[in-house]
Every structure is written in C-alpha cells, then in structure tokens.
C-alpha cells in the first residue's frame, strides 16, 4: 500500500467516486473515518488512521478500481 503525498481534498476531487466512510474502532468504538489516501495495485482508496486509543486491530477502508492509464500515471509518478 502506497500513501501518495496528496491532501484528502485533492484526492476526493480527483476521484470523486470515493467517499469518506465512517468506520469504528473495534476496541473503543470511536469513529475511524477513512481519511488517508492510498494506492494499491490497480485501486485507489481511503483508509482510516489508527484510533486515538491505539488499540484498534481493524481499519476502515474504501476503494475503487482505476484505469490502466491511471495506473501507468501513478507508476511513473511514484517510480515503483
Ligand atoms: Zn479506539
């Protein structure tokens, strides 16, 4: 999983099918919104950060598939 250096706002503008989901910590039940942009193979998405209690063993995540063109763009951009 790669975390591009973009803001949440930029990410949501670029991939407007993505929506912030409200996950919940499986330890304390606090909301864990998906606010961290990531790229994984041929998907882009948003994943939650660790809960403040730091005892969550789950993560909330939402993702969408991206086109070959987008994959190539990111591959070049990130050079991996
Ligand atoms: Zn928690």
Image (cartoon, rainbow, N blue to C red):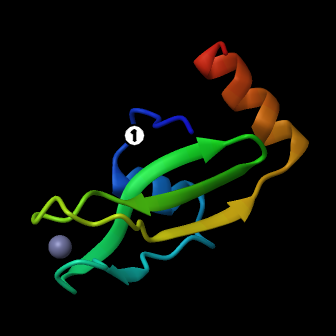
**Ligand 1 is within 8 Å of the C-beta of the residue at disc 1:** no
Judge left or right: residue 58 versus residue 43. Answer: left
Q: Which residue is mark 1?
A: 6
The residue positioned 10% from the left and 66% from the top of the image is 53
Residue closest to the eye, 35 or 29: 29
Q: Position of residue 79 (x, y in %)?
A: 65, 13
Q: Residue furthest right?
A: 68
- The residue depicted at 41 percent of the width and 66 percent of the height is 59
Name the quarter showing ligand 1.
bottom left
- Rendered-image quadrant of the N terminus: top right
In the image, residue 2 sits, relative to residue 40, either above or below, namely: above
Residue 76 percent coordinates (x, y) = 71, 17
Q: Nearer the viewer, residue 18 or 31?
A: 31
With 18 as the anchor, is 25 left or right in this view? Answer: left
In the rendered view of the protein, which quadrant contains the C terminus? top right
Residue at 28%, 77% (x, y): give it.
Answer: 25
């Amino acid at each position: 999983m790669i975390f591009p250096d973009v803001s949440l706002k930029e990410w949501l503008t670029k991939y407007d099918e993505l929506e912030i989901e409200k996950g919940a910590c499986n330890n304390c039940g606090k909301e864990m919104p998906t606010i961290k942009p990531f790229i994984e193979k041929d998907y882009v998405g948003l994943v939650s950060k660790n809960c403040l209690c730091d005892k969550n063993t789950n993560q909330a995540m939402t993702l969408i598939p991206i086109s070959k063109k987008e994959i190539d763009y990111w591959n070049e951009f990130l050079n991996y």
